[in-house]
């Protein structure tokens, strides 16, 4: 990613001092300043959101209980929550460019044995009770990493809740306000529910690109009406190339597989019947000897996709989002977010924002670097793995 206000030599306390000077001023006071500096330092050192663990990591020359009580009391300050959240958003938004990828993803924050925390909901019959979290990850063009831009948490019990799609769109609108409408949404079809993706696409004032396998509303092409999937099957593609997809093995340690694919794509103007908006349908087809040919519909607001460079460049960019998402999930799990022990929703919200700030610092300063193992590659993946093609042994 681009370096922003963070220098490699800055400690996390110096990083916070820079944020404070540039964005916060005297709005949080001396007590709020010490609280945020201590929490960021504690989370950074302990990789935990448990207040007892954080307090122990600070190693203050007072009783542990007193430190814990101070942190808990200040964690219930919604003014600090709003100031820190907006500070991170606008600090990150300053680096967003027109071609920045803004990856929208969701995950569930489960708390299996929680019963008293405010606004707790049941996520489903087969799931633990908990909350939903929407994150926005920013990736600048040709950057080697990403950074967390914004995070929001809710449940179906919060005041004014309508549905998940409304909450996600609130996040998107807030981000685009901060970036001055710069950047393009890359929707994570593996975590965003189908109805959420549908609502974002129908409100296509946002620049976006998204898989549309389960997009239900009808689209019009050459005065005929189709679903996105049926039209993708019908259309002929223009450009193609060989690619290699790495499929990880199971967590127990099974060897992964490198799959050779012939990927070909074409882009066609279509109209959303429901709204009248004109989009581009990218027909992405991949073929290998084992499963034959598979068609994937992708909808986007992007234009100028007639050339090979522009179309295949956008396809490559879209496929690379999963590299970021896998890396971020692994990174986020290091902080064990489900280990929180607070009873108020505002405290949980601030904890999530503090972890976001720590990740922002670590990525920006270069202390956390994204692994360079792309799932999709123009060349065969290196390493010991199964392959669906013959690769000569260089040492033979």
Image (cartoon, rainbow, N blue to C red):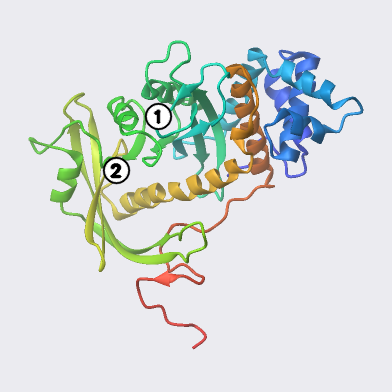
Asked if residue 336 shows in the view, the reply is: yes
Please name the residue shown 73% across and 20% down the image. Answer: 72
Crowd band around label 1 with a 10 angstrom C-alpha radius: few (<14), some (14–19), many (20+): few
Q: Residue furthest top?
A: 159
Q: Nearer the viewer, mark 1 or mark 2?
A: 1
Q: CA distance from mark 1 to mark 2?
A: 43 Å
| Residue 57 at x, y percent in the picture | 80, 35
State which tag comes first along the sequence, 1 or 2: 1
Residue 114 horizontal side relative to residue 53, left or right: left
Q: Give the label on residue 124, or none.
A: 1
Q: Residue at x 35, y 71 (%)?
A: 388
Name which quarter of the figure residue 15 lies in.
top right
- Across and down, in percent, residue 327 comes to 54, 48
- Image x and y of residue 205, in percent: 33, 25
Which residue reaches farthest left?
223
Secondary structure at numbered mark 1: loop
Residue 15 seen: no
Residue that appears at 42% across and 25% down: 168
Res. 389 image quadrant: bottom left
Q: Nearer the viewer, residue 316 or 309?
A: 316
Q: Judge by depth and name the residue closer to the eye, 152 or 209.
A: 152
The residue where tag 2 is placed is 304
Res 48 quadrant in image? top right
């Amino acid at each position: 990613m681009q370096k922003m206000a963070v220098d490699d030599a800055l400690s996390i306390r110096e990083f916070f001092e820079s944020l404070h000077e540039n964005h916060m001023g005297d709005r949080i006071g001396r007590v709020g300043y010490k609280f945020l500096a201590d929490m960021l330092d504690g989370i950074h050192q302990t990789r935990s959101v448990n207040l007892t663990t954080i307090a122990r990591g600070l190693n203050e020359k007072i009783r542990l209980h007193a430190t814990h009580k101070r942190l808990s009391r200040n964690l219930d300050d919604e003014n600090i929550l709003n100031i820190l959240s907006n500070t991170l958003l606008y600090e990150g938004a300053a680096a967003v460019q027109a071609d920045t990828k803004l990856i929208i993803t969701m995950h569930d924050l489960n708390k299996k044995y929680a019963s008293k925390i405010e606004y707790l909901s049941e996520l489903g019959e087969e799931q633990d009770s908990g909350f939903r979290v929407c994150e926005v990850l920013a990736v600048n063009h040709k950057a080697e990493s990403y950074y967390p831009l914004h995070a929001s948490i809710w449940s179906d019990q919060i005041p004014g809740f309508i549905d998940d799609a409304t909450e996600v769109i609130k996040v998107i609108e807030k981000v685009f306000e901060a970036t001055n409408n710069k950047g393009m949404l890359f929707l994570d079809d593996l975590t965003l529910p189908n109805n959420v993706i549908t609502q974002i696409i129908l409100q296509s004032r946002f620049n976006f690109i998204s898989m549309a396998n389960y997009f239900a509303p009808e689209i019009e092409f050459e005065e005929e009406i189709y679903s996105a999937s049926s039209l993708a099957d019908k259309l002929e593609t223009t450009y193609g190339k060989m690619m290699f997809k790495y499929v990880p093995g199971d967590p127990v340690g099974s060897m992964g597989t490198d799959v050779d694919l012939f990927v070909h794509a074409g882009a066609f103007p279509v109209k959303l019947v429901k709204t009248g908006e004109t989009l581009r349908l990218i027909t992405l087809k991949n073929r290998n000897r084992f499963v034959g040919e598979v068609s994937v519909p992708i909808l986007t607001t992007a234009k100028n996709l007639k050339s090979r460079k522009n179309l295949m460049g956008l396809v490559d960019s879209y496929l690379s989002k999963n590299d970021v998402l896998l890396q971020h999930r692994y990174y986020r799990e290091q902080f064990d977010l489900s280990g929180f022990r607070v009873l108020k929703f505002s405290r949980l919200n601030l904890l999530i924002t503090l972890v976001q700030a720590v990740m922002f610092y670590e990525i920006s300063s270069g202390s956390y670097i994204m692994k360079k193992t792309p799932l999709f590659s123009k060349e065969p993946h290196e390493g010991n793995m199964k392959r669906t093609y013959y690769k000569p042994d260089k040492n033979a």
